[in-house]
Amino acid sequence: MSVKKHTIRYNFMMNLVLTASNVLFPLITFPYASRILYAEGIGKVAFAASVANYFTMLASLGIPTYGIRECAKVKDDREKLSKLVQEIFIINSIATALTTVLYLCSIALIPRLQQDRKLFLIEGINIVLNLFGVNWLYQALEQYDYITIRSLVFKTISIALLFIFVREKNQYAAYAFVSVFALAGSNVLNFLRLRRYITLKKIYKPKLRRHLKPILILFAQNVTTSVYTNLDIFMLGIMKTDADVGYYNAAVKIKILLTTIVTSLGNVLLPRMSYYVEQREKEQFFMLMKKSLKLTAFLSILLCGFFIVSARDCILFLAGDGFSPAVSAMKLIMPSLIPIGLSGLIGVQILTPLNKEKYVLYSVMVGAASDFLLNLYLIPQFGAAGAALATTIAETLVLMVQLFLGREIIEDGVRGVPWIKYLLSMMIGAIPAGIFMIKSSLPALLTLFLGGCFYLVGFSFVLLVTKDDTLRDIMGR
């Protein structure tokens, strides 16, 4: 069966719909769950998920990125693609089996995990289902319409399950199951559809060794990245209370939602960029890189400014009055949107297709080390706010290292971004929006909407006067 090819614009729109669903799903589930489970229950689930994420990352090795890159290169040859997918799947199966055993032993032997053994077992389902998802193949083949529709169906089902099974404060395990179902339930369907794209037949001499070095390099990158994306919650859970984890998780939830918007374009670029590299289409590669950098900078700065000034109303709307300590954490973590968006694009979508994944590894090692040291100092004194500040600093250092190491490749693209104009637009938009929100006595949702209108008018003013081409492209398309 031939794979239908779509334009980058079509893939971007499909991924944007998926991103929108990822935003709307927590907007529906988290306000409901936070009011039922309170900060302590949310904190328990967040802590268990953070631990399970480490094991899921261990089982995945560096396969999610490696699989996309390598499958995209041979997607026009079904025989080569079939062999490649099966070889990668064998490696992934071995890693998943060993990791699952290690995870179960950890639950049995570590007292902190035994306290909520049922919760940790539920979160552990992700480890196994992640193997059968083979999501890297579908992304390499740019099947974003299927990925989006599949995700929407399972998210809709999970919302219904949430309202049915999560009704009391002690039902946090049910909330964890619903979250796992929404995230990984569709992976079984992925596995059943494999025959549409590859031929499954026995490989007598699978060449696994050729994949190990790049997979392990990308795995080391994933490990260090995971340290400073999950370490905050883990260290808060160890050094502070479940309530502190719950407050921080509220701020992180919003950051993750916005990150999916900022990275929505970059997520569809890796297969196409890898394909351009394989076909030696350098002009197409660098043209796409320059446009992507400008759009990512535009979106990240736009969102950063608004959600700093609207932090109080966002927390009030999403989590309720009981989460007011999360406001300061949210204000401190929002600036990380800018380095996260840019480093994600530069590291995964530009350097990785060019086989410069070592540069990405070095950058995230710096980020992980700085995040750990900053957490040791800031969390005991400032709790959730300290963890948020540590994340922002760490993400900024990651971007700075990538800019330095990849300067010969990305220098022209970075210089082409009108940084001063975008930052000035953010400040001009934030002033009227901030004044309105401080003085507003309207309900949180209405305050957010009207404040957003003030912000967009102010933000767009400078760009319209200077005829910014990125804004013009967005409005025109």
Image: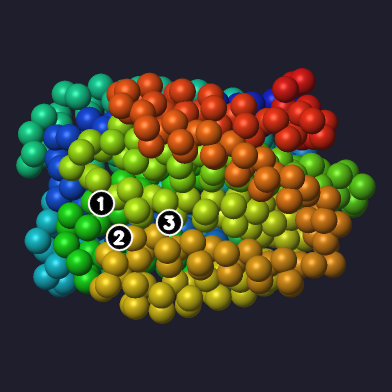
Q: x, y percentage for residue 4?
A: 71, 26
Of helix, strand and loop, which one carries label 2?
A: helix
Residue 67 visible in image: no
Q: Residue at x 83, y 50 (%)?
A: 416
- How many numbered circles are shown? 3
Cα separation, mark 2 vs mark 3, equals 10 Å
Cα separation, mark 1 vs mark 3, equals 12 Å
Q: Residue at x 26, y 73 (%)?
A: 380
The answer to whether the residue labelled 1 contacts the one labelled 2, judged by CB atoms less than 8 Å apart, is yes
Quarter of the image for the C terminus: give it: top right
Q: x, y percentage for residue 193?
A: 51, 31
Q: Which mark is residue 178?
A: none
Way the structure is coloured: rainbow
> Looking at the image, which is closer to me, 202 or 308?
308
Q: x, y percentage for residue 179?
A: 30, 39
The answer to whether the residue labelled 2 contacts the one labelled 3, judged by CB atoms less than 8 Å apart, is no
Q: Which mark is residue 325?
A: 1
Upstream in the sequence, badge 1 or badge 2?
Answer: 1
Q: Which residue is mark 3?
A: 332
Quarter of the image for the N terminus: give it: top right
Cα separation, mark 1 vs mark 2, equals 8 Å
Upstream in the sequence, badge 1 or badge 3?
Answer: 1
Asked where in the image residue 302 lies, by quadrant, the reply is top right
Upstream in the sequence, badge 2 or badge 3?
Answer: 3
Residue 444 visible in image: yes
- Tell me which amino acid carries mark 3: Leu
